[in-house]
Image (cartoon, grey):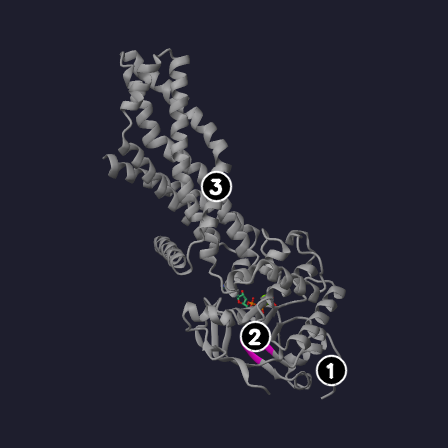
Amino acid sequence: MITAFVRSVGRYGLFCWDCGVSAWRHGVRWDRVMGEASKLGVRSFGVLAVMALFVGTNLAIQGHAAFSALGAQSLVGMFVALAGVREVCPLLAGTMVAAKAGTEMTAQLAVMRTKEQIDALEVMAIDPRAELVVPPLLGIMIALPALTIISIAIALGSSVAVAVWQLGLEYGDYVDWLVSNITVFDLTAAMIKALVFAVVIATVSGWFGFFSERGPIGVGSATNKAVVVMCIVCITLNFFLTTVLYG
Amino acid sequence: MAEPVIRFQGVSKSFGSKVVLQDLSLDIPRGQTTVILGPSGTGKSVLIKLLVGLLEPDEGSILVEGVDVATATEAELFEVRKQIGMLFQDGALFDSLSVADNIAFPLRRHTTLSDEAIAAKVAELLAKVGLEGIEELMPSSLSGGMRKRVSLARAIVMDPEIVLFDEPNSGLDPVTSDEIDALIGRMKDELGMTFIIISHDIVGTFAVADKIAMLYNGGLIADGTPDEVLHSREDVVRRFLKRNMELPPL
Ligand SMILES: Nc1ncnc2c1ncn2[C@@H]1O[C@H](COP(=O)(O)OP(=O)(O)OP(=O)(O)O)[C@@H](O)[C@H]1O
Ligand SMILES: [Mg+2]
């Protein structure tokens, strides 16, 4: 059990290394990378926007419920800023991208493995990692930080709307409380998280797809395992990142 | 026989405790058609995958044009593979690309040909496999036989020295199967390439083969011209052939 786990981690590490070597040797096709990034951005934007919208609203309501009774209304803005920017939005965007782009990548690679298309690439003397894994990997690394920033903006915006129209706070005061609690460091930290999540999502989904068992059952189980592992690894790394960045 | 273009020397391959190939040696003559026969699960596909470096042998060497693919660097392996075209069992066409883009794929990656030159080459190959004018179709809308033909066109688009066929007839009805056999026979005459065909289809096989090798229990039980194999005294060989064709008396 434990040795099997260690061996899997080792093989995963080797796969990541190989991807790096492939990218270095065969070059990166930036047109494909930008294509992947914009495809991912466009496809995930809608659902992420809706989720971020309602994350912002609820953070504002919870902050208000907790702090207004204490007469510490300024803490509402601080609460929304800290929770939203530092924790919720990076995770939210990461989870969305894992669920959409990650599963799609795993399923696609697993089908290609099943139908011998990955073998076909190799026989054509084309590196399948450089062709199939590196472009989406870099695409996710570009798109996820952007999506994280967008979701932060939307969540903060919707919290302002709720704070002013629903909770009756003063617009100028509330925005002041928000802005004074968000530093450049916070935004940088959110970007670092987004980049780490992007690498995890792309390499984990790539690994499970690339080495999937052949056949429809193999495709299904690869996709399933990839989602579980991506989510667990991301949430665990989030803890360590928060510890390192803010602890 | 001509100088061999491929030499398997003492090749062994196991998966876990399952021995698939054991101390196998086989020469593939240049410019001829070699057919590899054998019951299901004897390692015919493994043999081909070893040849293109998709699998590594546990022991032995596999020389392709003098390069041992078992110990070659990635760059050497890529050079070897550029001389090889392969027809996969189910075609292995890329689902997201049209027929034309599938065939053009290796050209786009390995040559600097213009778009017009590539389009002309694609049209020429489609004509050669009897499928003029289907450039814009997607693989999902092709029948099994068409998919194999397109895949064959893609396999020879780089004018390879060696073409590998993994069960070109599998999954096809007898009529389509005959058409594919005829197509392979024509290609063989026209192109002068080295063909290696893995097949169950014994009758069609004997028509195109210059050499036949039969795999059984990890080794070769027959290795010679079709005529020699027909007259083999080996019991398994006779049993394998008898199901499909009249054997000469011993
Ligand atoms: N990657 C692999 N991992 C483990 N076992 C394998 C692998 N590839 C092949 N085998 C095993 O090797 C044996 C030979 O397989 P192979 O696919 O070469 O048979 P085959 O002669 O091509 O059969 P068929 O005519 O059915 O295609 C089988 O028992 C198979 O289970
Ligand atoms: Mg096979």
**Are both tags, 2 and 3, on one chain?**
no
Magenta stretch: give its range.
B214-220
Identify the subunit bearing mark 3. Answer: A
Which of pointers 2 and 1 indicates the residue nearer the eye? 2
Query: Residue B161 shows which numbered tag?
Result: 2
Q: Which residue is mark 3?
A: A38
Report the side of A245 relative to B195 (left or right): left
SS assignment for the magenta stretch, majority: strand
Compared to B29, does A10 lie above or below?
Answer: above
Compared to B81, does A86 lie above or below?
Answer: above
* Residue B160 in sight: yes
Q: Are marks 1 and 3 in contact (CB under 8 Å)?
A: no
Compared to B172, does B96 lie above or below?
Answer: above
**Residue A161, located in which quarter of the rendered image?**
top left
**Residue A64, located in which quarter of the rendered image?**
top left
Considering every residue shown, the one lying at the far left of the view is A247
Measuring from the top left, give residue A119's x and y in whole percent. 52, 62
